[in-house]
Each structure stands twice: as structure tokens, then as C-alpha cells.
Amino acid sequence: MPTLTRTKQIPVIGEYDVVVCGGGPAGFVSAIAAARCGARTALIERYGFLGGMATAGNVAPVTEFMHQGELVVGGIPLEFVRCLEAKGQGTMCPPRGNFVCHPEGYKLEAQRMVREAGVSLFLHAYVSDCIVEDGVITHVIMESKSGAQALKAGYVIDATGDGDVAAMAGVPMLDYQCPLQPSTMYFILGNVKTEMIRGYYPGQPGSSMKHVRERLNELSKTQDVPQFGGPWCMAGMGEGIAIVNMSRMAMDWTDEVQATEAECRLREDIDKLVKLLRENFEEFSDATLLSTATQVGIRETRHIKGVHVLTGDEYKAAHFFEDSIARCSHPIDIHSDKDNSQICIYLDKAAYLPYRSIIAEGFPNLLVPSRCFSADREAFASARVQAGVMGLGQAAGAAAAMCCEDGRSVKDADIQRLRETLIAWGAYLAEAD
């Protein structure tokens, strides 16, 4: 393949204790946590708004804050959704604590909390590289309309979801030796007879989407029905409005060619799926397509090889770690890359997530709290959801600020102090009976 060599001067426009890369659920919570701990904090986000998959992908359900009716995720993540709820921008649904919110409300509240914490925010900026010296990331390079610019960093939090910074820095990645979970493009419909859609979220008593799945499976025997999952429909957005999660495509988001094909094909699939919904189901008979997500929703790409690889056995047993920093109660949820099937394993107890799974050996100032944290396929398939990575992000931000204050590597973080801080904020980290 032909190559080019180009040398250019990149201005260093700021120096920060903590630089957070990615403003999704893990990232914006990380930035708030670090800033509240007194760290000079910067947050780099590729879009013009925060929220990541929650807003760019229209992933309206923020799952899950409860297990059997008891809260298991607290602190900044819970503060965030309670603020949305108080402003009429979302609803908490017991007993699993699925929080169904309006993406526009999510954008604004995340922005407000980040700015109120004193975080320096860089929107429309794409992380393109980093400078590494003996495993230490000294600078993060970002591209924007202003060209290439660099931020000098004491500590770096990779909340890109895809482990972009970790990959650039040379962090080893896990190899599952199995296909990635498929991607989804959410879409929003208007003129839906929402009174006929009884459940806000899958698993709630009275959800009315099972018949849609059965009918589409039957139709697929005689006509072209695009690959789908669920379907799941969130009808708490206002009269006649519903967010739908059903499109599916196997692809690797880290491959530009595959990413482009997914964006194009899934919009074509949505056009077909909306027609099928209109033609076959009374609740969607007058439905109109209002919008598709800004980008394809990604479930899975890279996974770092951390100091500890969280296993499915540990996860299902709710094994308590001395360095437990977050919890998650979402089912182990593995979507097939080939068909409409799905593995769903419900947990007897909410799982614990260890600090050692968000750090990598030999990288003393890097934390990776987003869905690319160190876990095997089963553990990842649960902890990848929003409430889970928000909890990891909260811990990563606090840990980075404390390590900066103490002059420690992330591997030598004061875990007792970190846990005490998180618990004081409202995190539910005590060992379960």
C-alpha cells in the first residue's frame, strides 16, 4: 500500500491534570468526577453535544439502576437521571431501574453538569493521536476546524467506547475469537398509536412488542425482511412518538469501509422496516419516520487487556472484589451477528466491577472505563450498558484526580480512599449479604 510521510507543528493549547477523551456516558461522568475532586479537567468530544450512544445513537433507555427494586448504581449517575426526571425528561421504571429519557434532555443536562463542574469542554474535536513516552501518555492530539491541536495531560481517561486512545498508545487488546455483537441504528416514529404500546421497555409487564417479532419472523419466510432484533419500543417520549430499536448488522466499527457500509445499509433497512410496521400492525398503521440516529449504535469493538480480566463466572456469582468501584445488574445480553436470536441471562445479584479492569499493565497514567474495559464476553455483555459504564466513569474520574494529587501511578491508586469517596457520593459498593 502506498504511504505518505508528513511532518507538521502542532500547538499545545492547554495543560490539564486529567484529559477525558469521549463525552459519552462514561466520559462526561468521568469529567464531572475528576473536576469535583479538584483536578483541572478537559473533555474532548467528536460531536457538538454530549451523551455518546445515548444521544448520537438515540439509545433512550439508560439501563439499569436497580436490582429487584433496590438501587445498585448511585452517585453522579443517579444524580444525573434524577435531575432529568425532575425536569420531566425521563422516567425511572422499577423493578429493574430502567430509565427512559428524552435524548434532547440528556444532551442539555449532561452539558450543564459538565460546565457547572468547571470542565474545559472541546466539542467538534476528534482524538487523532497521542504522544507516549515509556508508557506515559504526555499529550493527546485532537483535530477540529482549528486544525491539529494538543493538550498536555497528567492523566488520560479513554472513554471513546472503542478504546481509540488505548489502541494508539499500544495497550494490548483481548481477542475473544468470536464475532462482535451486531450494531443497531435506532429510529424515531411519529403518529404512533402509543396507547397500544403498553410497556416503556423490554421486560416490563405488559410490553406489547412480542407479537411484532412473531409476525415479522413469519413474514420473513415469504418476503424480504431485514435482519432485526427485539423489537423494542420506548413510547414515553410524548403522544404519538416512539423510539424503536430493531435494526441489526454485523460489522466492525473500527474499520472505515465497514462503518460506512453500515450507515448506508441500516438506513435502507429502516426504510423497509417502517413500511413493514405500517402495513402489518395497527399501532404503526399511520406512523411516519421522524429521524434516524446521528450514527449507528455500537455494542462492541475493542477490549483492553487490563490488569484483571473480569470473567463471566465472577460476574454471575456477584463476586466482591477489594477494589470494587461500580456495580451492574443488566442481564448478560448477547445479540447474534447472524440472525434475530439473543442470549439473555438474568442475574441473581448485582455484579461488582473491579478497578483493576480499567487499567492496563505498563500504562501508569491511563484509565479505560467505557465499554472497552477489560472483561470476557459474558461479563462485558452486561456491564457495557449505560449505568454500568457511568459507574466506571465516576470511579475513573475520581481515581485520576486522586492519583494526580498524590503523584501516584494509576496502578498504585489509594483504593480505600477511592471507595470511601465513591460511597460518600452515594455509590452502592458495600459487599452484599
Image (cartoon, rainbow, N blue to C red):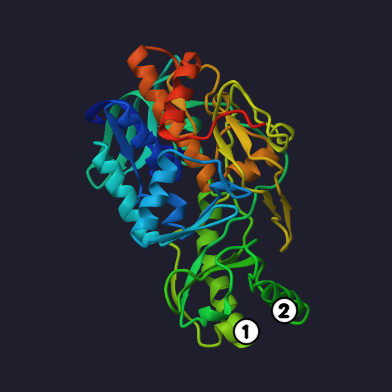
- Where disc 2 sits, the SS reads helix
Which residue sits at x=59%, y=46%? 300
Q: Which residue is tagged 1? A: 281
Whether 207 is drawn above or below 259: the answer is: below
Q: Nearer the viewer, residue 253 or 363?
A: 363
**In terms of image quadrants, where is residue 217?**
bottom right
Which residue sits at x=39%, y=45%? 79
Q: Nearer the viewer, residue 40 or 72?
A: 72
**In terms of image quadrants, where is residue 33?**
top left
Q: CA distance from mark 2 to mark 1?
A: 9 Å
- Quadrant that contains the C terminus: top right
Q: Is residue 1 visible?
A: no
Q: Is residue 116 visible?
A: yes
Q: Give neighbour class at mark 2: few <14, some 14-19, many 20+ (Cα, 10 Å).
A: few
**In terms of image quadrants, where is residue 182?**
bottom right
Q: Disc 2 vs disc 1: Cβ atoms closer than 8 Å?
A: yes
